[in-house]
Image (spheres, rainbow, N blue to C red):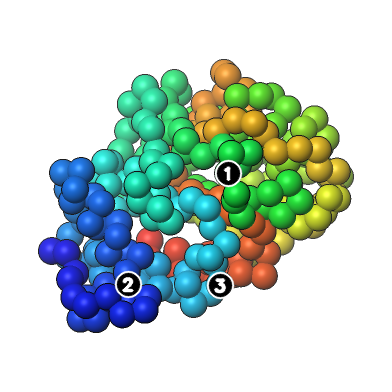
Amino acid sequence: MIGIGLNIGNRVMGGFDADYQAVLTHATSLGYALPSSSQQAKQNKLLVDLKSAGVWNKLDVFYCFANDGGDNFATLNWKSPSTRQITKVSTPNFITNQGYQGTGVSYLSTNFNPTIGTNNYVQDNASRNIYLYAEGVSADVGLDGTTSTTSNGIRRASAANQRINQSTSSLSSAVDFTATKEMKSIHRTSSTNVECFNGTTQASRTATSAALANSVQFVLRGPNSTTFGTHTISMYSMGSNLVSENTAYTTAFETYLNSL
């Protein structure tokens, strides 16, 4: 089922939010299987909740991997369904209603390079958010990263080299991102300040920013060419910092995920 109706403002009268409808419409045009009708309603509510929380307009990309429509639908960027679609590299596993699971050699490319175009994700105001559903092999630390060892990277570890736009600089002290079934996020709020969250628990650190990594961002591939995660990831997003919105963002996504 696809919600249809008259588009008035930001709503489709008698149907879904216009931005969620755009995701369904684009998926249909590509011949992708859609989530069940009951799940479409839950996803529409998630998107509406992100708007109410002030999250939506700050994002550049938002991928909801946890769905019952399939792994093609999971590749779509809800913020702009026809752009920055996920490319699956070396066939990661897809688990219905949980998301993508790395195999040790597979990963996801967002096809989003923040140095190209005008974006919310900029050098001194940025965030990356990832939902870690389940851990894989404990030694596999890669949650996200780029092609460079000196660029962005969230590690499933207790480490000081959690990085956001800071080149080789490490955080002033380690941040522990090992817990599972939890949102992990890293936010740059200035040229010196970095805020990290495990769910809604905040850890404030310092690290001087350097530059945006001139590279697309990867998921389940760490900040070098040999570190791959075997974890299960339910969502991923990038945009400007969401420190003030983090609790509402986490609550909205966990409410959706727990309803599946």
Say which amino acid is labelled 3.
Gly
Q: Label 2, on which residue?
A: 17
| 222 left or right, relative to 211 | left
Q: Earlier in the sequence, mark 2 or mark 1?
A: 2
| 4 left or right, relative to 251 | left
For the C terminus, which image quadrant?
Answer: bottom left
Q: Is residue 59 above or below residue 219?
A: below
Residue 71: x and y in percent read 28, 41
The answer for how far apart the CA atoms under marks 2 and 3 are is 16 Å
Residue in the image at 17% along x and 60% along y: 36
Camera-near label (3 vs 1) is 1
Q: Is residue 233 above or below residue 41?
A: above
Q: Label 3, on which residue?
A: 54
User: What is the total number of numbered labels drawn onto the structure image?
Assistant: 3
Q: Is residue 42 above or below residue 125?
A: below
Residue placed farthest to the top in the image?
A: 226
